[in-house]
Image (cartoon, rainbow, N blue to C red):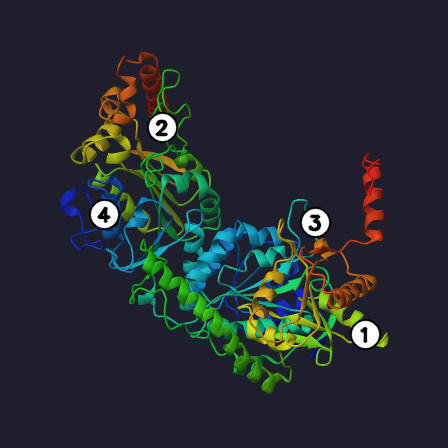
């Protein structure tokens, strides 16, 4: 059935379709609509699950992992400060190999505090062991949550999954979404029956024990890493099956006008829609440009990315995040993925934009592409990240500084 | 209701925690865990927050016959919530048998109980979670070498409250965890002591008939932290009760009853004098002011109780 759903509504719809049995919760903007929707359905008895509001995200993620290991399908959601508050437990539930799905509704991090999105929250969790799928549209949000349980619960993976959607741009934006039938989803996603780590009286088990031995520690961490790498192949299998049943196809990357493009912008999440729109317009101006969106951020699909970008003249990585003192977070990962390919692009430039939800305008995309063209022509390397900030942005800040009594600040 | 448990002879014979662990010789907490697990019997899950007891299970060994789940320091009660809720869901949906059900025990030290894990505990009690909580109170961060915790007593010496010419050790009073927990009005909260095993077993038995949070704070003499010999642990635990420093009590739905009352209490200095962590109150010179103040604090407590 086709419905107009917000990104948050799409998450909730997917969670109900997946027959999730347990939902530890804690409110935070812009995620809250997800847990409000789920709790309403549970109260109305249109969803059969247990909903518990915990005392914090740290407790919430702990409870989610513990319940998952005890044998129930578990979902939880958070944003931003909440994800960071739970940070210690992200590493723990991943180490416990608890196959929960967590929806993170991206929101920039304090300080200064704000509400709109960038990806410093979800990328802070990139080394935790969670598989990460970043969605561009409300449809992709719904589909990714359903696929996430298949990936998480696959014995070759057995890792928790974060499905990321941008606050405001997706969380509160209504789009037409195909909501599949429950029976179809049940065919795709069978009942959760864990084969290990299943806590009950007749089969005592020790979970989360200390190792205090570096060989054992390395062994378990390497296992997690290899399991995460397996998630790429598992994703492709799951995706093929998903396409067969539901007719929609997802790869670990998504591309737009990429094949014959000389210059490529690499993006993630909902801002890729702005990027695609700019690409369309630049094409009408005769620019051979395309876009590559990285959908699976962990495991990082190095080979897929290297293949897609082979032979391109220039690539711009637009990081909607900032590693203070380094620059864009995904840029060095792209560089690492491309380094060993014969046909690696000569020009690879880092751009930082979209922080705190700041839109990336067409003129900025045009600037990005002409920067690539210039660097390819002149062979001038660009070592530092380019920080996107327009004249309009500056005028706005200057106005606010003036109101704040700091009017003599110069540009 | 009559109790099956009165004296040491009534301790269940079956061991749930077998010998051979990395804990210190004479650990008061270890004895408490052993008895507590005997009382819970098979089919328990021990959910442990980072602390001394985390050294009980170290891969690939465990002394527990039943399940064990090590969590981070701040959120063992939250894990108990997740496990309990999941078991209830599985039983409701007939995915597991009733025999598969587990008694859920949270096991933490005083640092996790009084400090970093207090929020998670408050949440679990507030939600009426059906679980046991055993806080072994050795009055400091013993696992990291005995630094001051919020449960360290006034004037005690720890690695972070060293006595000097200007300071007599900790200048803060011990946090009253019993009263903090009791303010939530759980069905059961009690203090226990390894020197009063009968009292302890009776309390666990009584709590076992109740549903909801069943909370225990156990006095746990710590040989290396307190500077005492391993063979003096029980004697010192007994002195703590006989001097009135460690009151044995319970609160059912918030109503407090003292379960052991010594009409004639020993002077507190008999307890203080047994431990290196209070040695600065006696040597090189006797600190009359502090000793008198500690006696006064204890007397004030009991005068209010016995009024």
Q: Secondary structure at mark 2?
A: loop
Mark 2 surroundings: few (<14), some (14-19) or many (≥20) residues within 10 A: many
Q: CA distance from mark 4 to mark 3?
A: 52 Å
Q: CA distance from mark 2 to mark 4?
A: 26 Å
- For the residues beneath circles 4 and 1, the answer to whether they share a chain is no
Q: Which residue is mark 1?
A: A287
Q: Quadrant of residue A304?
A: bottom right
**Residue farthest toward the bottom in the current orientation of the protein:** A244
* Chain letter belonging to callout 3: A
Q: Which residue is mark 4?
A: B35
**Along the polypeptide, which appears first: circle 2 or circle 4?**
4
- For the residues beneath circles 4 and 3, the answer to whether they share a chain is no
| Mark whose residue sits in front, 2 or 4 | 2
Q: CA distance from mark 3 to mark 1?
A: 36 Å
As drawn, the label of residue B153 is 2
| Mark whose residue sits in front, 3 or 1 | 1
Q: Are marks 4 and 3 in contact (CB under 8 Å)?
A: no
Q: Which residue is mark 3?
A: A114
Mark 3 surroundings: few (<14), some (14-19) or many (≥20) residues within 10 A: few
In this view, the residue in front, B152 or A4, is B152
Which residue sits at x=26%, y=17%?
Answer: B282
């Amino acid at each position: 059935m086709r419905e107009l759903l917000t990104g948050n509504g799409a998450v909730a719809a997917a969670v109900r379709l997946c027959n999730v049995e347990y939902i530890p919760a804690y409110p935070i903007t812009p995620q809250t609509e997800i847990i409000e929707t789920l709790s309403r359905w549970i109260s109305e008895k249109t969803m059969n699950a247990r909903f518990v509001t915990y005392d914090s995200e740290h407790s919430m993620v702990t409870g989610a992992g513990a319940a998952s290991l005890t044998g129930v399908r578990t979902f939880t959601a958070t944003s931003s400060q909440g994800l960071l508050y739970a940070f210690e437990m992200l590493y723990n539930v991943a180490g416990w190999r608890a196959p929960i799905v967590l929806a993170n509704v991206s929101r920039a991090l304090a300080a200064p505090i704000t509400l709109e999105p960038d990806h410093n929250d979800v990328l802070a969790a990139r080394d935790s062991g969670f598989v990460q799928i970043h969605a561009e549209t409300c449809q992709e949000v719904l589909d990714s949550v359903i696929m996430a349980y298949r990936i998480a619960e696959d014995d070759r993976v057995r890792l928790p999954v974060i499905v990321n959607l941008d606050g405001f741009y997706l969380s509160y934006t209504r789009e037409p979404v195909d909501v599949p039938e429950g029976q179809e989803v049940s065919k795709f996603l069978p009942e959760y029956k864990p084969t290990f780590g299943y806590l009950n009286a007749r089969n005592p088990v020790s979970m989360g024990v200390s190792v205090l031995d570096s060989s054992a520690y390395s062994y378990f961490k390497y296992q997690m890493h290899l399991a995460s790498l397996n998630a790429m192949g598992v994703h492709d299998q799951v995706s093929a099956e998903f396409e067969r049943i539901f007719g929609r196809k997802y790869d670990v990357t998504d591309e737009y006008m990429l094949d014959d493009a000389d210059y490529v912008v690499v993006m993630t999440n909902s801002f890729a829609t702005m990027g695609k729109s700019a690409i369309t317009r630049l094409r009408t101006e005769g620019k051979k440009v395309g876009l590559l969106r990285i959908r699976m951020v962990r495991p990082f699909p190095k080979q897929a990315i290297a293949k897609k970008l082979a032979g391109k003249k220039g690539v711009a990585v637009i990081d909607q995040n900032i590693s203070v003192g380094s620059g864009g977070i995904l840029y060095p990962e792209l560089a690492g993925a491309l380094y060993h390919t014969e046909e690696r692009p000569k020009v690879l430039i880092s751009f930082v934009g979209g922080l705190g939800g700041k839109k990336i305008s067409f003129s900025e995309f045009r600037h990005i592409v002409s920067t690539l063209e210039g660097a390819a022509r002149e062979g001038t390397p660009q070592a530092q990240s380019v920080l996107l900030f327009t004249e309009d942005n500056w005028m706005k800040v200057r106005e606010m500084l003036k109101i704040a009594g700091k009017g003599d600040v110069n540009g | 209701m009559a109790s099956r448990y009165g004296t040491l002879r009534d301790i269940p014979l079956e061991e749930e925690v077998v010998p051979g662990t990395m804990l210190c010789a004479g650990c008061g907490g270890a004895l408490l865990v052993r008895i507590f697990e005997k009382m819970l019997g098979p089919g328990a899950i021990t959910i442990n927050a980072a602390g001394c007891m985390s050294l009980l299970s170290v891969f690939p060994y465990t002394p527990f016959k039943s399940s064990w789940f090590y969590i981070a320091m701040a959120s063992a009660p939250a894990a108990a919530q997740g496990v309990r809720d999941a078991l209830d869901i599985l039983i409701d949906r007939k995915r597991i048998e009733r025999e598969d059900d587990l008694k859920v025990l949270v096991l933490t030290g005083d640092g996790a109980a009084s400090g970093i894990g207090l929020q998670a505990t408050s949440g679990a009690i507030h939600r009426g979670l059906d679980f046991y909580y055993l806080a072994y109170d050795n009055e400091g961060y013993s696992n990291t070498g005995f630094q001051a915790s919020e449960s360290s007593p006034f004037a005690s010496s720890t690695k972070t409250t060293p006595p000097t010419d200007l300071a007599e050790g900790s200048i803060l009073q011990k946090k009253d965890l019993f009263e903090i927990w009791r303010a939530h009005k759980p069905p059961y909260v009690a203090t226990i002591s390894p020197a009063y095993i009968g009292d302890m077993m009776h309390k666990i038995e009584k709590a076992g008939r109740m549903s909801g949070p069943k909370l225990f704070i156990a006095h746990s003499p710590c040989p290396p932290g307190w500077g005492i010999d391993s063979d003096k642990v029980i004697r010192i635990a007994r002195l703590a009760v006989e001097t009135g420093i460690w009151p044995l009590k319970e609160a059912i739905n918030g109503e407090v009853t003292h379960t052991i009352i010594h009409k004639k209490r020993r002077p507190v200095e008999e307890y203080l004098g047994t431990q290196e962590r209070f040695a600065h109150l006696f040597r090189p010179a006797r600190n009359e002011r502090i000793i008198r103040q500690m006696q006064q604090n204890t007397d004030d407590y009991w005068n209010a109780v016995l009024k």
